[in-house]
Amino acid sequence: MLENGFMMVVIILLINIVYVSFFTIRMILTLKGQRYLAAGLSMVEVVIYVLGLGLVLNNLNEVQNLIAYAVGYGIGVIVGMKIEEKLALGYITVNVITKEYDINLPKVLREKGFGVTDWAAHGLEGDRMALQILTPRKFELKLYETIKSLDPKAFIISYEPKAIHGGFWVKSVKRGKLFS
């Protein structure tokens, strides 16, 4: 089967897509503190890597194998990122600034299960309400849609917190009581 040049290219391409996807997910798991899961995944990843690289190195005279390896690497990065988007690991913090006091955005968001802290703020054009919202990443798009539906002109900034400690909302998340 490996004597067929086309099959060799396809196998190398697929091996590298899988390898780089695993690599991308492992890096993200490592950054999110999931060390044991990342270590387990890395063992599978290295076996796939050695197989793919071995096929290319044993056939260096076939330039299409090297091209397949490179293309598979690039596609693997994209596939790995797409998988990570679907997994949506971790949390995000979203800062919102709105001038719409009468829609009571904090109350609406809390009723939907989001952790919200709000305070009065002052901007160039007058009084504003500032909100800081913590949510699991899997609810990120739902949060944006809710905010934009209530205040299309809201100023929104999001980032991933490195560490979270304390607060009643974190306890609810750990008990699985969020968005039930």
Image (cartoon, rainbow, N blue to C red):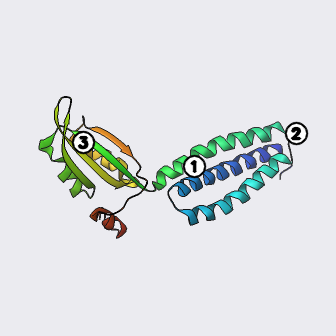
Q: Is residue 137 left or right of residue 103?
A: right
Task: Answer with left or right where residue 146 lies relative to residue 71.
Answer: left
Vertically, is 149 above or below 83? above
For badge 1, the amino acid type reads: Gly
* Residue drawn where x is 57% and y is 49% of the image: 80
Q: Quadrant of residue 102?
A: top left
- Estimate how packed mark 2 is, as few (under 14), some (14 to 19) or many (20 or more) residues with alpha carbons within 10 Å: few
The x and y percentages for residue 93 are 35, 50
The residue lying at 67 percent from left, 43 percent from top is 73
Q: Residues within 10 Å of mark 3 (few under 14, many from 20)?
A: few
* Residue 11 on image: x %, y %: 74, 50
The Cα atoms of the two marked residues, 3 and 1, are separated by 31 Å
Amino acid type, mark 2: Asn
106 in relation to 35, above or below: above
Mark 2 → mark 1, Cα distance in angstroms: 30 Å
What numbered label is drawn on residue 149?
3
From what the image shows, is residue 102 above or below residue 176?
A: above
> Residue type at mark 3?
Ser
Name of the residue lying farthest toward the top:
125
78 horizontally vs 149: left or right: right
- In the rendered image, residue 54, in percent from the top left (x then y), is placed at 81, 52
> For this view, does 37 lie left or right of residue 91?
right
Q: Residue at x 84, y 47 (%)?
A: 57
Kindly identify the residue that appears in the image at 31 percent across and 66 percent down: 172
Residue 38, picture quadrant: bottom right
Q: Are marks 2 and 3 in contact (CB under 8 Å)?
A: no
Q: Which residue is mark 1?
A: 80
Which residue position holds label 2? 61
